[in-house]
Structures are given as C-alpha cells and as structure tokens.
Image (cartoon, rainbow, N blue to C red):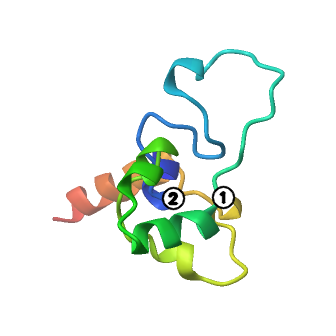
Amino acid sequence: MENTTIHGIASKGCPMCIILIDKLGKYSELDYIMHSPKVYMPAYNKFDTLSLNTNGVKNINNVLWSIPNLNPLELVRADILHNILLRVFEHMMD
C-alpha cells in the first residue's frame, strides 16, 4: 500500500483515520478521528512510541509531518500500476 509508506502508517491500518484493525472493512455510522501529523511529530520527538503505536503510526521520522500547512492525507498517492511499470521498464533496460 503506497499510502502506508507515504504517511508512515502501519501496514494494516487505514491511511485516513484511526480505526481498530478488527473494525476495518465493516460498515459503521461512527465518525473516526482522522490521522493528524501535527500530533505525530511531537510524539515522535518525545519518543512516545506508545502514542504512535496506539494510533497505528510507525515510529519513524516522516518528513511530511514537519512541513507547515501541509496535510499529507491530501497528497496525490503513487499508483501501484505506475510503480510496477517503472520497475518492469527499469528491469528491461538493465
């Protein structure tokens, strides 16, 4: 999943909101809390791995979290087919 890599979110989590893994794929009328990089950067700087893990975020320094006025959730995500085609092309050129 490209979203998890770009946003530093755990691979089995939702790239947009904080939701328990066992709730993924099930219909719910609840509104879930959106991921907030403004919360993650201070938690990372304080070595608060418990907070990051609870929110389904990897304990990494994601450069996107420190850019002012940028919401990484709104970035254009890489297309997996595009990535595969680039690798195939690279392989063929080698």
At label 1, the amino acid type is Leu
* Observer-nearest of 85 and 70: 70
Whether residue 34 is situated above or below residue 44 in the rendered picture: above
Q: Earlier in the sequence, mark 1 or mark 2?
A: 2
How crowded is the residue under tag 1: few (<14 C-alpha within 10 Å), some, or many (20+)?
some
Whether residue 26 is situated above or below residue 9 in the rendered picture: above
The residue wearing badge 2 is 7
At label 2, the amino acid type is His
Quadrant of the snapshot with the C terminus:
bottom left
> How far from the left and from the top, in percent, is residue 13?
50, 37
> How far from the left and from the top, in percent, is residue 23?
59, 20
Quadrant of the snapshot with the N terminus:
top left
Q: Who's the residue at 65% across and 46% down the image?
A: 16
Q: Quadrant of residue 65?
A: bottom right
> How far from the left and from the top, in percent, is residue 50?
39, 49
Q: Quadrant of residue 60?
A: bottom left
Q: Which mark is residue 73?
A: 1
Q: Who's the residue at 44% across and 57% down the image?
A: 8
Left or right, 57 with respect to 18, comes to left
* Observer-nearest of 36 and 47: 47
Q: How many marks?
A: 2
Left or right, 65 with respect to 70, comes to left
